[in-house]
Image (cartoon, rainbow, N blue to C red):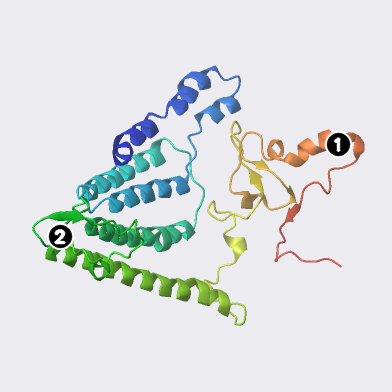
Amino acid sequence: VTYAELFTIPIIKLSDIMGNIRKHILAPRARDQEEMNSYMIGGKFELAERYTDATKVLFVALFYASILPESYFLGSAALFIHFLFGKFCLLRIWRSAPDIGPGLARLSRNSFFSTTLVVHMLVSAYFWSGYPYDQVCEDGNGGYKFCNQDMFGSRIFPLPIFQTEDQWMTDSQEKIVSYYGWSSVAAIVVGIVLCFMNYILPGLSGLFCNSFEPSGKDQGIDFGDVKHRQEVQAYVPQIKENGFEYPLIACDISGLDLDLLGWNDPFRGFNPHRLTQDIDHIVANHGKSYGFFSQIKTWDPTAQTQT
């Protein structure tokens, strides 16, 4: 798995076979400019997939670290390679990614990465407790006998005090198993406490107390003064489909300030991208399309109301 993350997956991502076919074979043979532009759009950026790959590398490296110490270096190299090819693809191959908040990063950091560290300590304790894995112990009479050294299979927590009457662990082995075992106990207890304080307790208190806290400060700048900027957008239902250069607008925007859409077709405007226009043609013989799509409107607070 680690070698695949080091070589195979980065090579496949960087080669971008379908992207090159679309750009160098299909795009020059497009029938019009819009079709050609659709072929030149890069691949889709999936942040969840990037975090999945990083978590997979980290989990595999830490899981087998006790019996394969070089997995630390292999995992570090794989994560570094992921950073390099991810940065290159983000700037050169993939299409522009939408604005994404820090929710996924916090979830991975607080849940998946933390759980991986706990699993690392617990599994390492089990690996060290079973050494040398031969199921053979001294019988006290100069001979040997069978003894069960598999604490994981016996459902026994990996601590030297839980050994059977056959004491197979050496002094140094007992020491390292104790370090890993008690560290995993402490990590599990801390994880339970933090989970209760950060998730369960706020959820329960939110049922009885007001937990809202404003974020940031009022800068004294009206929204109408900045709505024309590209980074200021409203939530407008849109559908992004392959083969279309711009999103399809899935609502009635007849009363919307178009600066809030966040994009603009300089050649054809917004009408060709409005699904309400298609509905007008489809149900032309059955009345207007009012009611098929929700409406979205903006109100200018500076406008004077006439009576």
Rounded to the nearest angstrom, the CA distance separating label 2 from label 1 is 90 Å
Quarter of the figure that contains the C terminus? bottom right
Q: Is residue 284 above or below residue 119?
A: above
- Coordinates of residue 232 in the picture (x, y in percent): 56, 56
For disc 1, the neighbor class at 10 Å (few under 14, some 14 to 19, many from 20) is: few
Task: Determine whether, in the image, residue 111 is placed left or right of residue 34.
Answer: left
The number of numbered discs placed on residues in the rendered structure image is: 2
Choose the circle earlier in sequence order: 2 or 1. 2
Task: Determine whether, in the image, residue 1 is placed left or right of residue 302.
Answer: left
- Coordinates of residue 194 in the picture (x, y in percent): 42, 73
* Amino acid identity at mark 1: Val
* Amino acid identity at mark 2: Asp
Q: Which mark is residue 283?
A: 1
Look at discs 2 and 1 and give the one toward the viewer: 2
Please give the residue where the numbered disc 2 appears in the rendered image.
139
For disc 2, the neighbor class at 10 Å (few under 14, some 14 to 19, many from 20) is: few
- Coordinates of residue 221 in the picture (x, y in percent): 56, 68
SS at badge 1: loop
Quarter of the figure that contains the N terminus? top left
Residue 196 seen in the figure: yes
Furthest residue toward left? 142
Q: Nearer the viewer, residue 54 or 125?
A: 125
Furthest residue toward right? 286
Task: Determine whether, in the image, residue 222 is placed left or right of residue 215.
Answer: right
x 24%, y 71%: residue: 161
- Residue 117, located in which quarter of the rendered image? bottom left
Q: Nearer the viewer, residue 116 or 126?
A: 126
